[in-house]
Image (cartoon, rainbow, N blue to C red):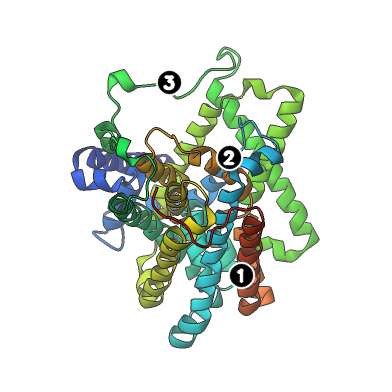
Amino acid sequence: MEFLISLCILSAFLLVGKALRANITLLQRLFLPSAIIAGFIALAVGPYGLNLIPEWVLRNWQPLPGILINLVFATLFLGVAIPGIKKIWSSGGSQLCFGVVAGMGQYFIALLVTMLVLVPLFKVHRLFGCIVEIGFSGGHGTAAGMKHAFDGYGFSAGGDLSLMSATVGILSAVIVGMVLINIAIRKDYCTYLSEKKGIPSYKKKGLIPEPKRFSIATATVASEAIEPLTFHFAIVGIAVLVGWVMLSGLKAIHPEFDKFPLFPLAMIGGLIIQKLSIKAKINRYYDKNTFDRILGFSLDILVLSAIASIKLDVFVAYLWPFVIIMFTGISWMVFCVVFLAPRMFSRFWFERGITEFGMQTGVTAIGLLLLRVVDPLYKTDTAKAFGFKQMIYEPFLGGGFITAFAPMLVTNLGIWQSIGIAFLFMLVFFLISYFSGWVNFKPDKTA
């Protein structure tokens, strides 16, 4: 009963967050998701604020992010037509190279600042630099999933700091992203901005009027036999189970994998299930929109419960090193958009760069939102290139295997060796971009 009531209270906060988004202009301009608004409200009335939420409610909320992130990652490849590598590379190769340079750069610059500044001045843990990529590129779900790994390496504050990093990342994605867009408008960096119509009012409020409403899913199995949502949720469950079996095997091979999170393997489990389903022709009964609804539901609950469960005393204890590392991460991503993007993209550099900025600091949805501001009719090839890039990028960075292995590498190889590996990744993918003919050292930034 306590668990049920805890979920009901969580639902109430979600609706309050939605109501505020629909009625407060500032929140609409910031495009903050209702789950984030609700999370901050819950945090404000929790033990670090008004202390109105019972301890048993928070105790039931705390495990949710670490559980739900597995469902989020398991759905990523389910119901998706998987194109060949040649097609992915021809359309999204330059976007992938830029994404890897930006993503690995978050490790490189953050670990470098940690070693040169934060360890000598503030005596922080050597894994402190990992919270940038985990929070920015990975997001709240990845941060929650990595909490166990941080605990295992003696950096128990890492999980909470990563959640704060994810929150700062989303705010930066929207606020800094819109500043960059406004600068680009004045400097004529956008290709089709003359046709800009802005974001419709209903999207800002998050309430769709009747003429623009649409179906969120399609039934592919008869509800007399099994409810369509139940069917799709069962497929997601099998994907997570496949990931769990793989993780159990890894743990049997080496005890170091006891600290490895489940969610990257749940994603691989989803990919395996999708591949087998295509061969068995079962995939024709998969509805991608239904999988997206499962993902979206899990992510909303995950984000709210993650923010509401943040331990603010940990944040206060690490205030100045946290501020420095966040400034470092944001500065790096601005550098990527302003300096690297025009040199690594031969066409539509700002559209491609700002989309990556939104994803690498916030979430994929914010990246696409920023793209829609500068390319409302999708006349550039950015959306397609970004989609193909994500198919290769996500299994490794932004919550994939590299993200999951990073604390292990820093702990076992050392921080300087890890900085060298991050730089090597950046260099290799920059050279791949260069020899593919995508790099121009003297770009014309104007569209």
Seen in the picture, residue 131 relative to 379 is either above or below; the reply is: below
Assign a secondary structure to mark 1.
helix
Neighbour class for label 3 at 10 Å: few (<14), some, many (≥20)?
Answer: few
Q: Which mark is residue 215?
A: 3
Disc 3 residue type (three-letter): Ser
Cα–Cα gap, marks 3 and 2: 20 Å
On the rendered structure, is 402 left or right of 302? right
CB atoms at circles 3 and 1 under 8 Å apart?
no
Cα–Cα gap, marks 3 and 1: 46 Å
Seen in the picture, residue 18 relative to 208 is either above or below; the reply is: below
Reading the chain from its start, which is encountered first: label 1 or label 2? 2
Q: Which mark is residue 76?
A: 2
Neighbour class for label 2 at 10 Å: few (<14), some, many (≥20)?
Answer: many
Which residue is situated farthest in the right direction here?
253
Which residue is at 67% across, 48% downward?
A: 265
Q: Residue 423 carries which label?
A: 1
On the rendered structure, is 77 left or right of 59? right
Q: Position of residue 432 (x, y in %)?
A: 66, 57
Assign a secondary structure to mark 2.
loop
Disc 1 residue type (three-letter): Phe
Quadrant that contains the N terminus: top left
In the image, which is nearer the foreground, mark 1 or mark 2? 1
Assign a secondary structure to mark 3.
loop
Q: Can residue 2 be seen in this view?
A: no
Which residue is at 38% across, 57% downward?
A: 167
